[in-house]
Image (cartoon, rainbow, N blue to C red):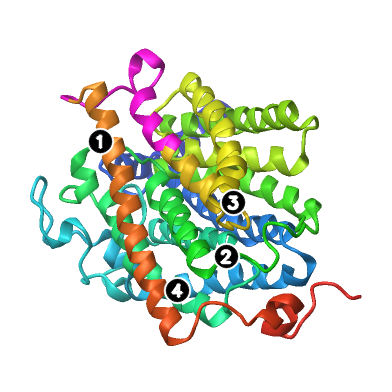
Amino acid sequence: MREKRLGPIVAALGVLVMALFLPAVAGAQDGGLDSGDTAWMLTATALVLFMTLPGLALFYAGMVRSKNVLSVLMQCFAIAGLMTVLWVVYGYSLVFDDTGMEAGVINLHSFIGGLDRIFLSGMSVDSLAGTIPESVFATFQLTFAIITPALIVGAFAERMKFSALMWFMGLWFTLCYAPIAHMVWGGDGALLWDMGVLDFAGGTVVHINAGIAGLVAAVMIGQRKGFPSAHMPPHNLTLTVVGASLLWVGWFGFNAGSAVAADGSAGMAMLVTQVATATAALAWMFTEWTLRGKPGVLGIATGAIAGLVAITPASGSVGPMGAMAIGLLSGVGCFFAATSLKRALGYDDALDVFGVHAVGGIIGAILTGVFVHSALGGVGLEAGMTLGGQVWAQFLGVVITIVYTGVLSFVILKIIDRVIGLRVPEEQEVEGLDLTLHNERGYIL
């Protein structure tokens, strides 16, 4: 009797379960919202913002002198605010509006998106980007727009006016970041996209872009007072290592999140990110240990960042073998760029933005074209693309990014210098930017 009574109840529960879950499954199959993908992208978005605040902010703050610690923190924080507003007003539209674009056709919109999406026009609660809410996709991409200009801060640390910095970041985002991001990620009709350039998470868009701008800014603003003869050690390596550790963890959102799905591509991106980072950290450490007699804490932390940078463009294309090779070459290559090359050329890239981000980004971008090959553990070349052709496309992508952002960064900085000046007066630089620009101290003396 009990079984007879339970039968209708079980049947009713079965119908209820089917009613609740089958529409969701059908919606996912039809290209609708996928809750798993959405949950992952919400997490990845938070991780990438975590990379700037507090990761990059702490990483940089520990490497400057104590009299400038607040200035670097302030710059990262202010950039996060400025980029958010600009992204909503027109940045998202300039990067992802595909109005007037057609595969294989070069026109204005091959270089920059349209303005149909200003103020996020057309975005609603129900708007989708693939299988996730468009609002989540837009916020995820916003976090990239935040960290890229924030990276540049390290090149001219301790000597740039805060007002000049704000103007530079706003103009640079508009004229350099948005066009490069559109050319790489804008889809069919975008210049570098149509050329077949592989950049999964931002080797060109983020790292080469920021690294070249940093070099131009460091050269134009000039060396810090006393450089290179005066000793300018990091004031707090503990902060730097904590910041580097936060960057390492956050980078899983950066790279694995760029799959824009909770799938095998995201899983492999996470694995190769870990492998390349660990390999680069050890490569830098052992290189420094061999040449200088002792392994440095700052060295292994910087080596890890070099590996993270280099694997970024490759993270959706290569396997573990390629990740180890990219990590090894970036660890050694960035070490020499941040030491020997900087000394030889005499530029004062205070926190090695060029040596780590530009050089690491170039190494990673070029090697993506090599290790994408299935015989080397990669996902395989696109139909009709040869290994030589892919490497050539990667090389052209690097050159176009360097030339474009190098020239535009110079022009922007030149205009700002003529109007309001780029550099603080010498007496303010000597006293420190914390007090002279913000009237606050990082530490109580």
Residue at which label 4 appears: 168
The reply to whether callout 1 and callout 3 are in contact (CB within 8 Å) is: no
> Of the residues tagged 1 and 3, which is closer to the observer?
3
- From mark 2 to mark 4, how far is it between C-alphas? 12 Å
The foreground one among 331 and 382 is: 331
Badge 4: residue crowd in 10 Å (few <14, some 14–19, many ≥20):
many
Looking at the image, which is closer to me, 227 or 191? 227
Q: Residue furthest left?
A: 105
| Residue at image location 72% in from the left, 70% down from the top | 68
Instruction: Name the residue beneath numbered marker 1.
Output: 393
Closer to viewer: mark 4 or mark 3: 3
From the top left corner, tell me how far across and down residue 83 is, in percent: 46, 70
227 relative position to 103: left or right: right
Location of residue 412 by image quarter: bottom left
- In the rendered view, does 181 fall on the left or right side of 421? left
- Residue displayed at 52% across by 28% down: 329
The reply to whether discs 1 and 4 touch (Cβ–Cβ < 8 Å) is: no
Element class at badge 4:
helix
The residue under label 3 is 352
Given contact means CB atoms under 8 Å apart, are the residues at marks 4 and 3 in contact? Answer: no
Q: Label 1 sits on what residue type? A: Ala
Residue 173's place in the image compared with 43, above or below, is below
> Dot 2 corresponds to which residue?
156
**Disc 3 residue type?**
Asp
Name which of mark 1 and mark 3 comes first in the sequence: 3
Up the image or down, 88 lies above or below 380; here it is below
Q: CA distance from mark 3 to mark 2?
A: 10 Å
Q: Which badge, 3 or 2, comes first in the chain's sequence? A: 2
